[in-house]
Image (cartoon, rainbow, N blue to C red):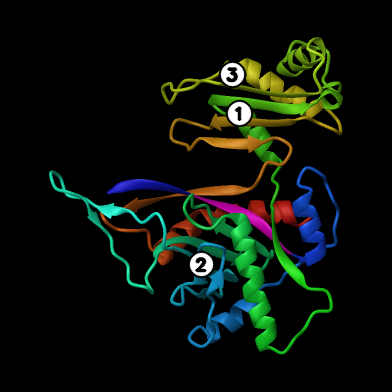
Amino acid sequence: MARKYIRFNYFEVNLVPAEDAIRRDLNEDEDIPFQANVWDMSEFLDYLMVNRREISTTVDIGTEYSEVEKDSYHYDERRDLYSFQLSKLRETNIPSKKKFGEIKEDILLDQDEYIGEFNSIVFDNTYKALIMQSNLYGLSVAQTEHVLTQLRFKYLDRMGRTEEVPLVVKLNPIIDNSKVQKVIESDYFKKIRLKGSDFMMDAALDDDSLLTDARRLLHQSSGLNIDITISLGRTERTSSLNQEYVQSAIRRFEAIGESKPKMEVTALYDEEADVETINLIEPRMTVRVSVDVAPRQTVGHEYLYQTFLEIFDTQRYELRRVLVR
């Protein structure tokens, strides 16, 4: 069997006035405040589970579709966790079948058939956190927000409820600042990226570090913005940038007050870990699980969920630490 590593990302589930969400999306580079309320999804998910055969969960997401897998709903009473699986269905870019030494064979789909990709979702009802499987070919965060928003509208309509101000779902990454210290203690540093303006770089300290080097370069060139990436390229897994230099740059970055430049570090915590990129301003809470996948098989939702629980039972204390202030 092949070992596959799957990442889950943690989010706060908020309900935001649609107009505010649109305004924020159109001005991504600006920190536009808006009123947001935490969405308790339990009543909504209870309804979907009970009426899984009667309610259509199909949502149009542009050139593709999404829906909830009807047999994936589950509620863990002991842990107060809901879980389900969202599918992403496409009818374009269809792969082919191939045998050694023979001509490839197209995969022919009927009119009602699609190629499916899947994201497992867990909702922690105690802390109102949504944990989403990261899948390169599955739904993006924005698409998941759209799907949940449309499903919520369907639910409200069936319940005969209306909103004076329509609310949409926004998934805000849960930030875990303890990850900054963890990345400092990494064994291998693969890449460091610094991005900011001349105003931000003026906050850099006067010492021999990446920050002051970047500030000096920016001023000497009479530039306004800077974007520097230092990486190894293709090297052995245990190769690393100068550990002392990178650690010093991270510590100097942490010492800066407000208006920090953006700084990302790609690191390997140890030889067995997965390579991870940490945004030092917003270090996001994630967890990685490993599963054994037999050839010619896909990872089932129940198997993935049970594997996730093995780590989650420990990490839930970290989730409580971050959310319960």
Where 270 falls versus 44 (above or below)? above
* Mark whose residue sits in front, 2 or 3: 2
Q: Residues within 10 Å of mark 3 (few under 14, many from 20)?
A: some
Where 94 falls versus 28 (above or below)? below
Name which quarter of the figure residue 12 lies in: bottom right
Per the rendered image, the range of residues in magenta is: 7-14
Q: Secondary structure at mark 2?
A: strand
Distance from the alpha carbon under mark 1 to that under mark 2: 43 Å
Q: Earlier in the sequence, mark 2 or mark 3?
A: 2
* Mark whose residue sits in front, 3 or 1: 3
x, y (%) of residue 209?
73, 14
Q: Is the C-beta separation of discs 2 and 3 under 8 Å?
A: no
Residue receiving disc 1? 185
Where 206 falls versus 159 (above or below)? above
The three-letter amino acid code for the residue at tag 1 is Glu
Residue receiving disc 2? 65
Q: Taking 175 as reference, is 315 left or right?
A: left
Closer-to-camera residue (160/130): 160
Where 268 falls versus 124 (above or below)? above
Secondary structure mostly seen in magenta is: strand
Distance from the alpha carbon under mark 2 to that under mark 3: 46 Å
| Image quarter (top left, top right, bottom left or bottom right) of the C terminus | bottom right
> Is residue 43 at least partly visible in the picture?
no
> Is residue 310 at least partly visible in the picture?
yes
x, y (%) of residue 121?
54, 63
Residue receiving disc 3? 243
Residue drawn at point x = 34 percent, y = 58 percent = 298
